[in-house]
Image (tube, rainbow, N blue to C red):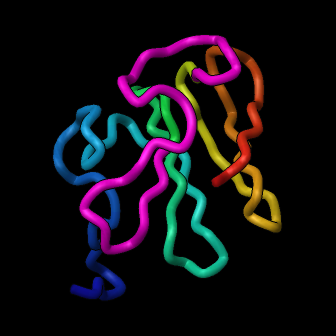
Amino acid sequence: MIGSNRTGITVAGGNGAGSNLNQLNDPSGVWVTRNGQTLYIADTNNNRVMRWNLGDTQGSVVAGSATGVAGSTNTLLSSPGDVALDPTETYLYVSDYYNNRVQRFVLQ
């Protein structure tokens, strides 16, 4: 279904707050790839960044914890707030709010 100018359509999440791969919990930052087919979403309360392809029923974890654990190591996040990709879409930058840092991850 295509949304009109007054009707939104759910493109990620929409299955209640939670930590399953088909759920988000306080999504706050979204980046859309150049081709418009993939979203990168800061899933704040799950302490992770999700990659969600348009039309998919679930996303995949690309940064942070798959189980929602917060942390300060270089593999964990604590309330990610925003995301951005570099112009070549090789690197993902994440504002890691409670760790007071910006993390860079290589996209695979």
Q: At 30% from the left edge and 87% from the top edge, which residue is drawn? A: 4
Q: At 40% from the left edge and 30% from the top edge, which residue is drawn? A: 66
> Can residue 28 be seen at all in this image of the molecule?
no
Q: Position of 17 compared to 85: left or right? A: left
Q: Position of 70 compared to 26: left or right? A: right
Q: At 29% from the left edge and 55% from the top edge, which residue is drawn? A: 58
Q: Position of 52 compared to 10: left or right? A: right
Q: What residue span does the magenta drawing correspond to?
A: 50-76
Q: If the image is split into quadrants, where does the C terminus sit?
A: bottom right
Q: Position of residue 102 (x, y in %)?
A: 76, 31
**73 or 95, which lies in front?**
73
Q: Position of residue 3 (x, y in %)?
A: 29, 83
Q: Toward which corner of the image does residue 26 lie, by quadrant?
A: top left
Q: Position of 106 compared to 27: left or right? A: right
| Relative height, residue 63 to residue 52 (above, below) | above
Q: Position of residue 35 (x, y in %)?
A: 60, 81
Residue 73 painted magenta: yes
**Residue situated furthest top in the rendering:** 72
Q: At 29% from the left edge and 44% from the top edge, which residue is drawn? A: 21
| Relative height, residue 102 to residue 34 (above, below) | above
Q: Main secondary structure of the magenta part?
A: loop
**74 or 77, which lies in front?**
74
**Residue situated furthest front in the rendering:** 108
Q: Toward which corner of the image does residue 18 lie, by quadrant?
A: top left
Q: Position of residue 43 (x, y in %)?
A: 45, 38
